[in-house]
Amino acid sequence: MAQIGLKQARVVDVHAHLVLEQTMGAAGAFGPWMGKEPDGTPYFQIGTTYRLRGVKYAGGPFMDVDLRLQRMDQFGIDYQVVSPNPLTYFHFIPPTEAGAFCRAHNNAMAAAIGPHPGRLGGWAALPIQSPRAAADELERSVRELGLLGAAFGTDSPLRLDDPELDMLYEKAVALNVPLYIHPGPAGIDGPPGDPALKRFDLDIVSGFAAQETLAVGTLIYGGVLDRHPGLDICISHGGGATALLMGRMAKAARKRPWSPAALRPEGAFEERLRRLWFDTHVEHPQVLDLLARAVGTDHLVYGTNFAGWDEPDAESSVASHPHDHAQLARNARRLLRADSATLDTALENQR
């Protein structure tokens, strides 16, 4: 299995985060830092106000690559694309600190996955509050470090359809790499979310789905896909509530006064929706079936939130997945340019 690689992998996981020791303190006063409470409970801290307690990063598959590979074998995952921890997107801190963190993160990621090109690829971290810096870091990460694309959050000081971000989208198209969008909990380094989200983990249980749905609407209504016809973007967790709200979103495109002329014809919204990609980490087979009918099985890729609180059970993660892993792996290879010179160059740089 160790030499299968992306081009031959039977199971490809695109939704898997990692934490890197070399990035501790890389954002200056914003951290991040790890430690233990007096009672031994581990914590992960951002700045002076956010502390995640009880999640073990050190000594586990989040940080130890050998343990990650062992766990991938247990779960039947041949190849995995690892991405930044959503707690460390740092999209709301000053660009200088954000850029320093992203450079340190991407260097450390490339070093961590480099010895395992047959099993691991990487999504780069980007300081998207500074689009020029983000575009430059994407190019460096792809051309020099061998990363396969970039992952960033749904929220930043710039909306996803802001014209300032066009230079980043143009760079992704020029480099022939995809982008992966995943939420981070509100209020870590930016504006606080609804106080109700702070109860019962609703910020990640339902808040993430809201952010992902907003991202889909913003990308389509805001014309990003029209301005960049060669751009491939994958949204985590099946795009949140998109499958449930697709009809309502499409009707808004046809009827609401703010909708651009290009979205008003019947089927125009749906056509653009089918250009986006979605990972299958949605927790319920009926939701996944609805999503597949909405966007097509050819734009779904497998995702696990590997080693996270909501990862699939090892016994069921692959064997009982309701969609064909051969199809999902083929889709992942298309998304990640496995048949292009881009991937060959990335793997060569990774080595």
Image (cartoon, rainbow, N blue to C red):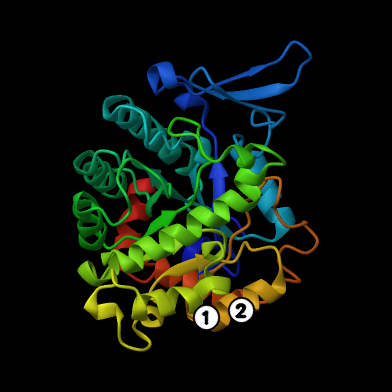
Asked which secondary structure carries label 1, the reply is helix
Q: Which image quadrant is residue 229 in?
A: bottom left
Determine whether 287 is above or below 173 in the image.
below
* Crowd class of label 1 (few under 14; some 14 to 19; many from 20; radius 10 Å): some
Horizontal and vertical percent for residue 206? 62, 52
| Number of numbered discs | 2
* Residue bearing mark 1: 294
Front one among 321 and 48: 48
* Residue bearing mark 2: 290
Front one among 250 and 271: 250
The span from disc 1 to disc 2 (Cα, nearest Å) is: 6 Å
* Crowd class of label 2 (few under 14; some 14 to 19; many from 20; radius 10 Å): some
Determine whether 323 is above or below 24 in the image.
below
Q: Residue furthest bottom?
A: 266
Asked which secondary structure carries label 2, the reply is helix
Horizontal and vertical percent for residue 102? 36, 34
Q: Is residue 345 left or right of residue 204?
A: left
Q: Quadrant of the N terminus?
A: bottom right
Horizontal and vertical percent for residue 136? 21, 43
Q: Which image quadrant is residue 35 in?
A: top right
| Mark number displayed over residue 316 | none
Q: Is residue 304 left or right of residue 213?
A: right
Residue at image position (25%, 53%) is 162
Front one among 159 and 174: 159
Residue type of the residue flagged with mark 2 = Leu
Residue at image position (75%, 21%) is 41
Residue type of the residue flagged with mark 1 = Ala
CB contact under 8 Å: marks 1 and 2: yes
Residue 351 visible in the displayed image: no
